[in-house]
Image (cartoon, rainbow, N blue to C red):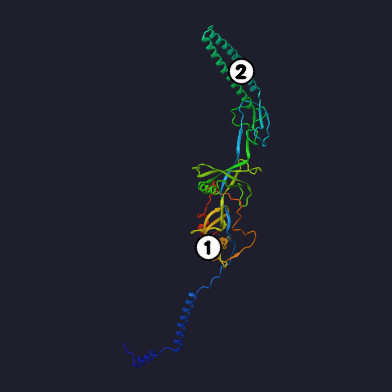
Amino acid sequence: MTQPTAQDNSGATAIDLRGPSPWRRWRWLALVLLVVVALLIWRWVAHRAPPPAAPPPPVAVVSTVVTPIDLPRYVVGIGTVQATTSVTVRARVDGQIERVAFVEGRDVKAGDLLVQIDPRPYRAQLEQARATKARDAAQLANARLDLQRYQVLSAQGATSQQQADTQAALVKQLEAAVLTDQAQIDYALVQLDYTTIRSPIDGRTGVRLVDVGNIVHATDANGIVIVNLIDPITVLFTLPEEAVGPVNAAIQAAGGTGLAVDAYARDSGAGGERLASGKLTLINNQIDNTSGTVQLKATFANAGHRLWPGQYVNARLMLGMRSQAIVVDTSVVQNGPSGTFVYVIDGQSKAAVQAVKVGAMQGNQAIIESGLSAGQRVVVDGQLKLRQGTPVTEVRNASSTRSAAPSTQSAPTSQPASSSAGSVGPASTTSPANPASPAAAAGPSGR
C-alpha cells in the first residue's frame, strides 16, 4: 500500500482548517430569528382575550306596579239550582179527567184548581152512606123507646130484668152503628173532595202529564203536573271539607247571620255577569266521606227568574275581607326548582328574580304573603326570554297592558274541586301555585 505524500497531507490540512463564510452564519441567525418571531406570534394569537360580547338587546315586557288593595275572601263551588219547594201533583182517587184548569208554565197560587176528576161515583157513595146512617138512626130511636118501656115494666115486675138488659145492649149496638155510618159519610166526603185537585203551593206549573178523558189512578207514578216554587229559589253547592272551618269561623264573625253568596253562570269567566245574590242558609251536618266534600245551600230572590231549577252555576261564598293585601295577576307568578318567584324590574330597567310565597289563588288573582312589597314593579307578560339581569323595555298599549290587581268584583273562574272544590270539585280557600307545572323544569327563565 502506498503512503500519501507530505505535500498531499499538508494540502488537506489547509482545507479542513478553513472556517465557514460570513454570509452562511447570517443566514442561520435569520432563520432562528424567524422561528422565534413565529412562535411569539402564535402564542399571542392563541392566548389573546376574546373581544367583549355585545350586550343583549332589551326584552319587551308588560309590567305593573304592585298596589295593596282590600280584597274579598271567598270560596267557589259548583252548584245546582233547585226549586225551594217542588210538588208532584198526583190523583188520590181513581177516575176520569173531566177538566184541566191550569196552563202549562204559568204561575198558580195555593188552592187554585188544577184538575177535576168525575165526581159522580163518589157523590153516590156519599149519598149511600148518609142513607145508611138515617136507617140506623131510626132503629136507634126505636130501640131507645123500647128500652124505656122494658125498664118501667121491669120495675113493676111485669117483665124480667134480663130482657131490659138485652134491650140496653141493643141500644149500644145501634149507637155504634150510627157512629160507623158517620165515619163512612166523612170518608165519602174526603173521597169526593179528592176529585177536585188543587195546587198545594204557590209556584209555577210544568208540563201537563194528563189530558181530558184520561183515566187516572191513585197508584200512578208520574202524576198530573209538577209545581215548583222558584221565587225564592235555592242553590245547592259543594265545597271541600277543608272549607268547613273557615266557613264556620266567618259565620261566627258575622254574628250568625247568613253569609253573602253570589251566583254566576257556569261558563262565565273573569268579568262574567252575576246572576243573583243571596244568603247562605245551610251547611250540611255531615261531610260526604266518599268525595271529601260538604254540601251547602243558599237562598236567592228570583223575581226576574235569572235562576232556573236544574241550572248549573258557580256559587261564590264570601268569607270576609283581606285588608291591604298584596295581589298580583296569576300570570305574574312563575314556578322554578326553588319554588314560586316573580320577575321584578329594578331601577336600571333590568329584570331580577325574586322569590315569593303565594298564600291563595282566587280566580285570576294570586295573593302574595311574602316576597313583594307595595311600589315594586313586576312583569305581567313577556317572562319567556327573561333571565337574571336581562335589560327590559316597557310595552305601553291598551291591548297588552293588564292590571296586576284586578277588580275585586270580577266573576270567579271555574275551578275543579281539589275538590275542590274538590273539583268537581269546587275551589278551596287556599290553592298555592302548582310546583309541578312545566315551568318548574325550565328554571328561572319562567314562561
Name which residue type carries label 1: Val
- Residue type at mark 2: give it: Lys
Q: On the picture, is 351 further left or further right than 107? A: left
Q: Which of the pair 345/42 is nearer the observer?
A: 345
Of 169 and 222, the residue lying toward us = 169
- Tell me residue 71's x, y (percent): 58, 54
- Kindly identify which numbered label has been placed on residue 145: none
Q: Which quadrant of the structure image shows residue 116?
A: top right
Q: Residue furthest bottom?
A: 7
Residue occupied by mark 2: 133
Q: Which of marks 2 and 1 is nearer the N terminus?
A: 2
| Residue topped by disc 1 | 353
Quadrant of the snapshot with the N terminus: bottom left
Q: Quadrant of residue 227?
A: top right
Q: Residue 220 or 239: which is nearer the viewer?
A: 239
Residue at image position (50%, 74%) is 49
In which quadrant is the C terminus drawn? bottom right
